[in-house]
Image (tube, rainbow, N blue to C red):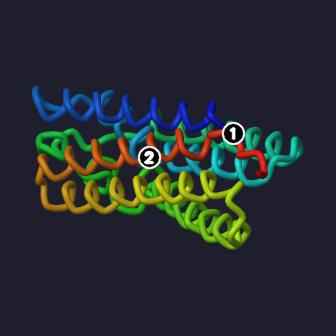
Amino acid sequence: MEGHWTVALAMFAVASAAMFLGVARGWTAAEFRLYWLFGAVLNVPYLFLGELQLLIRRRVVSIVGSVSIYALTVLAVVVIWRAPIHASALTDHLPLGKDVFGPGTAPHRLAQYYALPAYFLLLGGLVWSAARMGGDPQLRDRTVGTLGIAMGATLVAIGSGIGAAFHVVPLFSVSLAAGVAVMFAGFLRAGRPQRAPA
């Protein structure tokens, strides 16, 4: 689970670096592809896979989940990297995927097909974890950590969505940094060993 969470954080870092370069000196096609692939499409599914492996500690679940997400990752890379780009849209400070790739195109829709379901599954995992805890102090760290991850993902989603839609770079940047910090704290809390019963 920690491995996939680490990958998700690395994706946030790559997307953030691409965004910084794009805003600071003007976007290139490669920078936007990296930003879209790792920032809008893939990171939330990897967050969910880490949560799934935390909550359901069965080898078959881990294998099926991992193979599925790796296959989806390859598909996303191929679709996004081969898609034509509207270069004129890259002149904006924070270009939108629908403007760069075209509304309704496959790379534009991938963010909705990948990240949106994964986000709601992430929230569902939080609810399930809280229900399972049922007052059991041994599971408190896992539930609180999962809450932190879900809150961090929500901060990123709302802040970056509003920031990108209205081209407000500071809001986008602050929400991204805050969300990643909250998620990292959640990873640490959820990954604590279960407490031995007194």
Horizontal and vertical percent position of residue 102 = 33, 55
Question: Residue 118 at x, y = what percent?
Answer: 57, 58
Image marks 2 and 1: residues in contact by CB distance under 8 Å: no
Q: Where is residue 193 in the image (x, y as percent from the top left)?
A: 69, 39
Query: At numbered mark 2, what does the secondary structure look like: helix, strand or loop?
Result: helix
Q: Which residue is labeled 1 in the image?
A: 193
Q: What residue type is labelled 1?
A: Pro
- The residue located at (60%, 38%) in the rendering is 73
Q: What element carries label 1?
A: loop
Q: Which residue is drawn at 19% across and 27% down?
A: 21
Q: Is residue 23 left or right of residue 28?
A: left
**Quadrant of the drawing holding the N terminus:** top right
Task: Name the amino acid, label 2.
Answer: Met
Q: Which residue is drawn at 82% across and 40% down?
A: 63
Along the line of sight, the residue nearer the viewer: 18 or 97: 18
User: Looking at the image, which is closer to me, 191 or 59?
Assistant: 191
Q: In which quarter of the image is residue 166?
A: bottom left
Q: Residue under label 2, please give it.
A: 183
The residue furthest front is: 198
Q: Of tags 2 and 1, which is closer to the observer?
A: 1
